[in-house]
Amino acid sequence: MAVDDMTKLFKHELGDLLFAEKTFLKGLKAMAKETSDPTMKQRILEHADETEGHIETLGRAFEAAGLKARATKCDAALGLKEEHDSFKEEEEPTPEMLEAFNLGSGLRVEHYEIAGYRSAITLAKALGFDESASLLAQNLAQEEAMAKFLEANAAGALSKIQTIEQESEMEAAVEPEVSSRSKSRSKSSSRTSSEARA
């Protein structure tokens, strides 16, 4: 289909958002599993529920404009997903570093969605699709709220991750020392036993 008028462009924008929301929904569920901070995990799961609602709302936005709901392949959404997957596979991060990476990755996703919704709302208003614009604004508000949450809590979450990482490094450094002392005591004990038998 050639996009040769604004209504077709609007349909494309909605399809792009629909594809992106479905892609990011899977990502949110994976991100929740990769998150140890209880507050962050709970908010991610809440946003996954919101995202399911976004998919339904987008369907209604299509209908309000007299259009058939259909997802359009979104290369940007796939790129953001691939960025996460390739980092996880190629860089082999510790669980803590993957969690830290996810904070930035999640924020990039939210800002992409925010830009997409703002663009679609502007088009809807220009075309006189006021009901569609209102529905899209509901989704936009939740995306903006999630972005603000991540921005407000990222520093604290990163600080906790850093503490966990440092504690792990300290434990790793202590273990060889303890093991070395144990071996030393074992050798000393063996010499004493041998001397006693002599």
Image (spheres, rainbow, N blue to C red):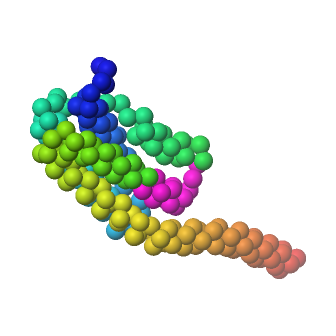
Q: Position of residue 136 (x, y in %)?
A: 21, 48
Q: Main secondary structure of the magenta part?
A: helix
Q: Position of residue 164 (x, y in %)?
A: 53, 70
- Report if residue 161 lies within the magenta region: no
Residue sitting at 19 percent across and 38 percent down?
127
Q: On the image, which quarter does residue 138 sit in?
A: bottom left
Q: How many marks?
A: 0
Is residue 149 visible to us here? yes
Q: Nearer the viewer, residue 128 or 197?
A: 128
Q: Nearer the viewer, residue 86 or 147?
A: 147
Q: Nearer the viewer, residue 43 or 19?
A: 19
Residue sitting at 47 percent across and 71 percent down?
155
The quarter of the rendered structure image containing the C terminus is: bottom right
Which region of the structure is painted magenta? 92-107
Residue sitting at 55 percent across and 70 percent down?
162
Q: Is residue 91 above or below residue 178?
A: above
The quarter of the rendered structure image containing the N terminus is: top left
On screen, residue 116 versus residue 94, left or right, reads: left
Q: Is residue 9 above or below residue 179?
A: above
Q: Nearer the viewer, residue 14 or 126?
A: 126
On screen, residue 144 versus residue 191, left or right, reads: left
On screen, residue 65 versus residue 179, left or right, reads: left
Q: On the image, which quarter does residue 144 sit in?
A: bottom left
Is residue 106 visible to us here? no
- Report if residue 104 lies within the magenta region: yes
Residue sitting at 48 percent across and 57 percent down?
104
Q: Position of residue 197 (x, y in %)?
A: 83, 76
Q: Position of residue 172 (x, y in %)?
A: 65, 67
Q: Residue furthest top?
A: 1
